[in-house]
């Protein structure tokens, strides 16, 4: 009920203790002066989509990168904002609930009040539907008291997660105008921030004075790019799930007679499954991106798992833990093609009970082969982005059933002489997303909230709050903002992605990089994980002590800090300008020209449009 939003919570002793925790701001956000350094104009990573994106976003494409500076920083041309008129800012939860979201609200509210006590923060009740209906709650420190460092989105709630249609965009603009908002902060993942980019462009075109800011909050960890190193909520989700997985590993090792198949959240990308594997060391993980790249069929996967079980049986081990991402079902080529046929028929209005009779012959054969429970789940109406209802499709049970049938077959044929295969299935989908956020997510979200204020104080529209150098302590974090249009890309072929997104500029999900260091670390240890039972239990979330400041393994091993490198490059370019001045020697000038010519030739080749792009 609407009247329940923002009411004081009944807190346990631990929750009360957490509500008193005060995250620390990096030096660049401290004080009451906003110091802004504007970098170069931005572009997009894939130049083949640059024209389409610039045409679709003429008012917000190519905006400059922004860095927020320490008080002692001496940067020529930096903008110093010392006067802070009262602001009215609206905030909306648009994505699925993710631990730490409340701290974005807290950080923004505190920054508004510190810079001008007369500023107002309005939270929209019930997500984007509340935005359209102009249902608000004024956020104050008293309202926030029992929500600081707490999980969930129950302070404001959330409903339908899109601001996309003309009617929805117009309703959002009408709300911002009626409430006289200087800024609108949208908290969410890839879909929500794509909508934020479009909203910012529409507002700019209509000369609406409200500035739109996006915040990367999604438990899936798939809103990653050169500007965004991590998402609020991912750290918590992986730590909580890793403990649950580790508990199951210990149970498997104790009973020595069950194989546990555990499906994890993560939508289209396998980041959660990969990170949980690196933290807890289960025997096996199936990475959806690897399946798609290798075009593995459901029968290939079944054989792969059965071969692993047989290898363990040769060591007298009849237990194990196998992880898989919820998006795996769409990574299996033949099942993805089957889903596309089913979704097409559903959109044409064909009733569920007649779908099977209108499938193509091969699709019909595959559909009939699958167990009845999976057939029923595949017939669920697709989500707004045309993807299957992944949380409702029990891929873990499908694989367990197929593996059991294959192991029984091998046993009858005599090729497998071990004990009978027994499977137990779990879906860790909702158990972690309402968790108390980790210390990292508390700090990260709070800092992002402060950055949102800095973005609005600088008068910026269509930007996302960013923090880089996240694997270090918060006093070394680099805070800034990047235009959301610089994160957009255009897909030119299906490539396993939704057909309805082809040709449209979107913030696309970042998938697991099969050439990245996190995946390489997994491959290096895969054999040991499979056969040696090197289970690792990170324990419950740590808020104090040696484990409190731990970071996600994938964050620590990857070589990130893109924003830091941009600044470093600019420093080198400035050194070149300082050395190569009129009056310098011919030899210095020739050396500079030769070096620059080689560098530009290499960079031109590397940044040319992707091969095969339309």
Image (cartoon, rainbow, N blue to C red):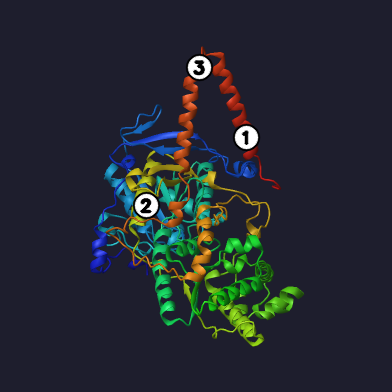
Q: Are marks 3 and 1 in contact (CB under 8 Å)?
A: no
Give the x, y percent position of residue 592.
56, 22
Which corner quadrant holds the N terminus? bottom left
Query: Upstream in the sequence, badge 3 or badge 2?
Result: 2
To which residue does mark 2 refer? Answer: 444
Helix, strand or loop under label 3:
loop
Query: Upstream in the sequence, badge 3 or badge 1?
Result: 3
Query: Circle 3: is it few (<14), some (14-19), or many (20+) Cα within 10 Å?
Result: few
| Residue at screen point 50% across, 24% down | 576
Where is residue 254, by image quadrant? bottom left
Who is closer to the viewer here, 559 or 53?
559
Residue 591, compared with residue 45, is above or below; it is above
Helix, strand or loop under label 2:
helix
Give the x, y percent position of residue 195.
52, 53
Viewer-side label of 3, 2: 3
To which residue does mark 1 refer? Answer: 602
Image side of residue 494 versus residue 103, left or right: right
| Residue at screen point 23% across, 62% down | 17
Helix, strand or loop under label 1:
helix
Query: Circle 1: is it few (<14), some (14-19), or many (20+) Cα within 10 Å?
Result: few
As drawn, the residue found furthest toward the top would be 583
Where is residue 77, by image quadrant? top left
Image side of residue 114 versus residue 59, left or right: left
The alpha-carbon separation of the residues under discs 3 and 1 comes to: 25 Å
Viewer-side label of 3, 1: 1
To which residue does mark 3 refer? Answer: 581
Residue 44, compared with residue 588, is above or below; it is below
């Amino acid at each position: 009920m609407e009247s329940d939003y923002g009411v004081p919570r009944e807190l346990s002793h631990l929750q009360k203790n957490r509500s008193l925790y005060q995250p620390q701001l990096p030096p660049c956000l401290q004080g009451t002066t906003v110091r802004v350094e504007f970098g170069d104009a931005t572009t997009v990573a894939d130049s083949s989509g640059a024209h389409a994106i610039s045409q679709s976003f003429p008012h917000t494409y190519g905006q400059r990168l922004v860095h927020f500076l320490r008080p002692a920083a001496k940067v020529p041309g930096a903008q110093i904002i010392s006067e802070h008129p009262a602001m009215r800012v609206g905030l909306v939860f648009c994505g699925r609930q993710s631990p730490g979201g409340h701290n974005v609200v807290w950080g923004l509210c505190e920054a508004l009040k510190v810079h001008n006590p007369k500023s107002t923060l309005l939270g929209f009740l019930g997500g984007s539907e509340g935005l359209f209906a102009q249902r608000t709650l004024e956020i104050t420190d008293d309202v926030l008291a029992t929500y600081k460092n707490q999980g969930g989105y129950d302070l404001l709630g959330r409903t339908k997660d899109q601001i996309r249609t003309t009617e929805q965009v117009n309703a959002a603009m009408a709300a911002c105008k009626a409430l006289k908002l200087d800024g609108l902060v949208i908290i969410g993942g890839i879909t929500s921030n794509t909508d934020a980019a479009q909203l910012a462009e529409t507002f700019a075109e209509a000369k609406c004075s409200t500035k739109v800011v996006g915040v990367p909050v999604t438990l899936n960890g798939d809103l990653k790019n050169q500007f965004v190193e991590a998402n609020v909520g991912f750290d918590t989700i992986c730590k909580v799930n890793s403990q649950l997985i580790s508990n199951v590993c210990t149970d498997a090792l104790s009973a020595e007679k069950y194989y546990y198949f555990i499906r994890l959240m993560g939508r289209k990308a396998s980041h959660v499954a990969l990170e949980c594997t690196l933290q807890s060391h289960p025997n096996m993980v199936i990475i959806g991106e690897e399946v798609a790249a290798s075009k593995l069929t459901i029968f290939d996967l079944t054989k792969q798992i059965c071969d692993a079980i047989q290898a363990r049986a040769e060591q007298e081990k009849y237990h194990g833990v196998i992880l898989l991402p919820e998006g795996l079902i769409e990574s299996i080529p033949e099942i993805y093609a089957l889903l596309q046929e089913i979704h097409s028929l559903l959109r044409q209005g064909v009733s569920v009970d007649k779908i099977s009779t209108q499938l193509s012959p091969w699709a019909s054969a595959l559909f009939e082969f699958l167990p009845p429970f999976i057939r029923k789940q595949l017939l669920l109406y697709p989500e707004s982005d045309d993807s299957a209802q992944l949380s409702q499709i029990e891929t873990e049970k499908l694989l367990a059933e197929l593996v059991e049938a294959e192991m029984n077959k091998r046993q009858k044929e005599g090729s497998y002489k071990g004990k009978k295969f027994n499977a137990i299935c779990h879906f860790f989908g909702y158990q972690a997303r309402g968790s108390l956020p980790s210390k990292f997510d508390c700090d990260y979200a709070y800092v992002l909230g402060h950055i949102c204020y800095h973005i609005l104080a600088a008068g910026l529209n269509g930007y996302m709050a960013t923090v880089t150098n996240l694997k270090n302590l918060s006093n070394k974090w680099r805070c800034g903002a990047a235009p959301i249009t610089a994160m957009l890309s255009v897909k030119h072929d299906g490539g396993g992605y939704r057909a309805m997104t082809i040709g449209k500029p979107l913030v696309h999900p970042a998938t697991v990089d099969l050439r990245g260091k996190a995946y390489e670390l997994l491959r290096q240890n895969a054999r040991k994980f499979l056969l040696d039972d090197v289970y690792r239990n990170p324990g419950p979330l740590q808020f104090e002590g040696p484990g409190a400041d731990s970071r996600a393994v994938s964050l620590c091993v990857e070589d990130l800090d893109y924003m830091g490198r941009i600044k470093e490059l600019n420093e080198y370019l400035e050194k070149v300008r300082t050395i190569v001045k009129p009056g310098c020697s011919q030899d210095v000038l020739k050396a500079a020209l030769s070096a620059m010519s080689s560098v530009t030739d290499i960079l031109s080749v590397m940044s040319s449009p992707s091969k095969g792009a339309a």
